[in-house]
C-alpha cells in the first residue's frame, strides 16, 4: 500500500481546481480506504479480490465504482476513495517491478524499518509539495453510504494525517530506494488524471484485474 502522505499528495495534486468544500471532501476521501479500525477490514475497504488458481491478488476499484456509480460522479469524497484504491494498484506495480525481495518486509524488524522510511518521507513530501492540513470531517459522515461495507474511522484518519505532517525525521531511507516514491507520484499522476476525467463522464480507462500481483510473503 502507498503511505498516507502519498495518497494525500495525490489528493492535493488532483484537486487543484476544485472549490474548497469539494476539495476538502476529495482530500478526506483520498485517505478513507485506510480508515479501517481492524486490520482484517483492510481487504474490505480496498475491495480486494483473488484468483486462487493463479495465486494473485488485486484491488478492484471497478467494483467500488459499480457500487457507488452515482456518488463517484457527484461527490468528491467518493471520487477520492476510488482513486485511492487505484493508486494502491499502481503502487503494487512499482513495488513488484522495482525489486520485491528488497522492498517487501520479511519480518517485524524490516517492517519497522519500512515504517521508519515512511516517517522520513512524510517530512520530504510535506516540504516538496507544501502539504498542509486541509481535512474537515463532515458532520453527517457516519450516516453516509460509504460506511455500509465497513464503518470507517474518519476522525482517527484525520488525526493520523495531522501527525504525519508533523514528522521531522531527516535521514537516508533503508528499505525503499531513494527517489522511488517521488518518481511514483510523478509517473502515476497522468494515469490518475485521465481516469479521474473518465469516471466523471461515467466511463473508465482501466481494468482492475490488469493490476494483479502474486502474493507469497507474510507482508506482501
Image (tube, helix red, strand yellow):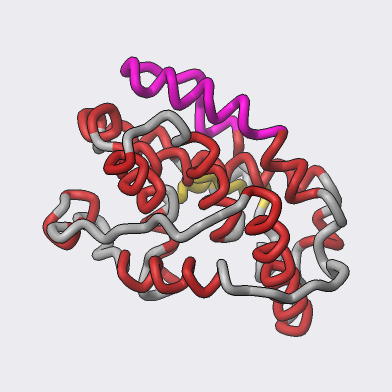
* In front of the other: 141 or 64: 141
Locate residue 177, reporting x and y percent.
Answer: 86, 56
Query: Is residue 207 in the magenta section?
Result: yes
Residue at image position (46%, 39%) is: 83
The quadrant holding residue 215 is bottom right
Residue at image position (61%, 52%) is: 130
Residue 79 vertical position relative to residue 206 in the rendered view, above or below: below
Q: Quadrant of the C terminus?
A: bottom right
Locate residue 38, reporting x and y percent.
Answer: 39, 75
Magenta region, main secondary structure: helix
Total marks shown come to 0
Q: Is 91 left, or right, of 52 in this rendering? A: right
Residue 159 vertical position relative to residue 86 in the rendered view, above or below: below
Highlighted range, magenta: 187-210
* In front of the other: 150 or 8: 8
Locate residue 213, reporting x and y percent.
Answer: 66, 45
Residue at image position (84%, 73%) is: 171
For the question of whether residue 87 can be seen, the reply is yes
For the question of whether residue 47 can be seen, the reply is no
* In front of the other: 213 or 162: 162
Locate residue 109, reporting x and y percent.
Answer: 77, 84
Query: Is residue 97 in the magenta section?
Result: no
Residue 125 vertical position relative to residue 25 in the rendered view, above or below: below
Q: Is 52 left, or right, of 147 in this rendering? A: right
Amino acid at each position: 500500500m502507498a503511505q498516507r502522505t502519498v495518497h494525500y499528495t495525490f489528493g492535493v495534486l488532483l484537486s487543484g481546481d476544485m472549490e474548497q468544500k469539494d476539495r476538502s471532501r476529495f482530500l478526506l476521501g483520498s485517505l478513507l480506504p485506510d480508515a479501517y479500525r481492524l486490520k482484517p477490514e483492510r481487504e474490505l475497504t480496498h475491495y480486494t479480490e483473488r484468483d486462487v488458481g493463479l495465486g494473485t491478488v488485486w484491488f478492484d476499484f471497478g467494483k467500488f465504482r459499480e457500487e457507488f456509480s452515482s456518488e463517484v460522479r457527484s461527490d468528491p469524497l467518493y471520487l477520492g476513495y476510488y482513486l485511492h484504491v487505484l493508486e494502491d494498484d499502481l503502487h503494487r506495480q512499482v513495488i513488484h517491478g522495482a525489486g520485491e525481495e528488497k522492498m517487501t518486509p520479511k519480518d517485524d524488524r524490516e517492517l519497522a524499518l519500512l515504517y521508519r522510511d515512511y516517517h522520513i518521507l512524510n517530512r520530504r513530501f510535506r516540504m516538496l509539495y507544501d502539504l498542509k492540513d486541509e481535512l474537515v470531517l463532515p458532520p453527517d459522515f457516519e450516516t453516509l453510504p460509504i460506511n455500509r461495507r465497513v464503518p470507517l474511522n474518519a476522525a482517527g484518519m484525520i488525526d493520523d494525517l495531522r501527525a504525519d505532517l508533523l514528522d521531522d525525521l531527516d535521514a537516508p531511507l533503508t528499505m525503499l530506494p531513494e527517489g522511488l516514491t517521488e518518481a511514483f507520484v510523478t509517473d502515476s499522476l497522468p494515469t490518475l488524471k485521465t481516469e479521474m476525467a473518465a469516471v466523471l463522464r461515467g466511463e473508465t480507462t482501466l481494468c482492475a484485474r490488469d493490476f494483479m500481483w502474486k502474493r507469497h510473503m507474510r507482508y506482501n
